[in-house]
Image (spheres, helix red, strand yellow):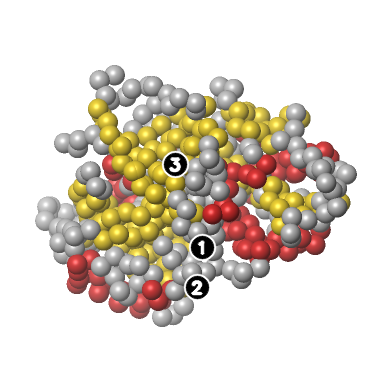
Amino acid sequence: MASLPFIFFLSFFIISTTLTSAGVAAATIKLSLSPFPHPSSSHPYQILNNLVTSSVARAHHLKHPKAKADNTTSSLLRASLFPHSYGGYTVSLKFGTPPQTLPFIMDTGSSLSWFPCTSRYLCSQCAFPNVDPAKIPTFAPKLSSSKKLVGCRNPKCSWLFGPDVASRCQDCEPTSENCTQTCPPYLIQYGLGSTAGLLLVENLVFPQKTFQDFLVGCSILSNRQPAGIAGFGRSAESLPSQLGLKKFSYCLVSRRFDDTGVSSNMLLETGSGSGDAKTPGLSYTPFYRNQVASNPNFKEFYYVTLRKILVGDKHVKVPYSYLVPGSDGNGGTIVDSGSTFTFMERPVFEVVSKEFEKQMGNYRRAREIENISGLAPCFNISGYTSIKFPELSFQFKGGAKMALPLVNYFSFIGDDKVACLMIVSDNVVGQGSHGGPAIILGSFQQQNYYIEFDMANNRFGWAERRCA
């Protein structure tokens, strides 16, 4: 630990000497998403346990984020999303002049986009399957003619550090308009992972359009982050905010395609206007803006109002205080592509899991698998030729229902002899200990759904699809 400040200073000195300080047309962008490999042994139970641990840690981070800071013209930008055993989905983006292509984990639960930066990038605990920590793709600032360090008085610096960041610009004269001091270094945590670096403005390049002066992080040090993050949250520094997106959508391929190269499309719709036409076939519920959050960072999350949870035809009685944010901003449900498994606070999880136990009482509990995997309840289904699983459904404000396919909430392991519920919680009982969102809808439950974030009309849409 004693050597860490020196590493920070050395890295920032190197990048500081490498870099120099310094009417959007409508479009639609298409991207590709792919799942990311997870650091673990090859044993399936250990992989599940790691994903459970990372999902719970991610939930803790989202619930307690550190303060940081009808005439319509539109077009689509497209990219590919790839699934990985890490539990996330990556998208390739191009930055710089000439463009450099790098993979980014698509994350709707955070806002800053950043890439591993310079040849001196260091990542601890990054020995992921199919990832050599020494060969992690990095952005080379010295090869780009369009990169610029963000100055301490640049308004974009305040996006992360707040309006009082000027008080940290100690080398700037109060009356000076040409201060060359850079924006302070950032440090961001993601549950089990973290990253630190300096802010740049750089060109973000798509085939149809180049977005200049895009705020992006140049990370020098990371922990458990072998790829960058594409932040799709709701804050000013997010990719949707900077590109002025009306909406974005994705379709996450099944987890069985992890690390296979199979991808699906992500669509980014830019342009002016506020047409309210709905995408055919989609169900919708309004977004809920958590304006009274006890932590201002909750405002970057995509809240939806969950009215009911049904196991089979049984309405599970979840306390209202967990379904809707209270006067302190705690409670409610968010949609987060960066979480693998859906998280429920313990009082919510217990009533849901107990209902599954009740309706599946004919099957013996697989306690050993529960202890190894971290999942529960798990049921031993060996020897059965016909197995009945209750349906799991979420009903949202407005009446729209998301009835999950079986593979989105149960996983079959151990030569299909055991079935485990793929929803996680922690061991803390009661909101007083945690706060923040009580339910986090993760990517595992979103697989093989067409998902739409319609910011122009403040609504969340979905429809079951075959995404591959």
The residue under the point 40% across, 43% down is 266
Compared with residue 274, is residue 91 higher up or lower down, i.e. above or below?
Answer: below
Of circles 2 and 1, which is in front?
A: 1
Residue 192 is at least partly visible in this image: no
Q: Amino acid at mark 1?
A: Pro
The one of 56 and 341 positioned closer to us in this rendering: 341
Q: Residues within 10 Å of mark 2 (few under 14, many from 20)?
A: some
Side of 130 relative to 80 (left or right): right
Find residue 182 and report its horizontal and vertical position in percent. Answer: 22, 61
Q: Earlier in the sequence, mark 3 or mark 1?
A: 1
Q: Amino acid at mark 3?
A: Tyr
Q: Which residue is mark 2?
A: 127
Find residue 69 and report its horizontal and vertical position in percent. Answer: 37, 51
Q: Which residue is mark 1?
A: 37
The residue under the point 15% across, 61% down is 145
Find residue 258 and report its horizontal and vertical position in percent. Answer: 53, 57
The one of 96 and 198 positioned closer to us in this rendering: 96
Side of 132 relative to 39 (left or right): left
User: Is there CB contact under 8 Å for labels 2 and 1?
Assistant: no
Disc 1 secondary structure class: loop
Disc 3 secondary structure class: strand
Of circles 2 and 3, which is in front?
A: 3
Mark number, residue 250: 3
Compared with residue 5, is residue 34 higher up or lower down, i.e. above or below?
Answer: above
Q: Residue furthest front?
A: 385
Q: CA distance from mark 2 to mark 1?
A: 10 Å
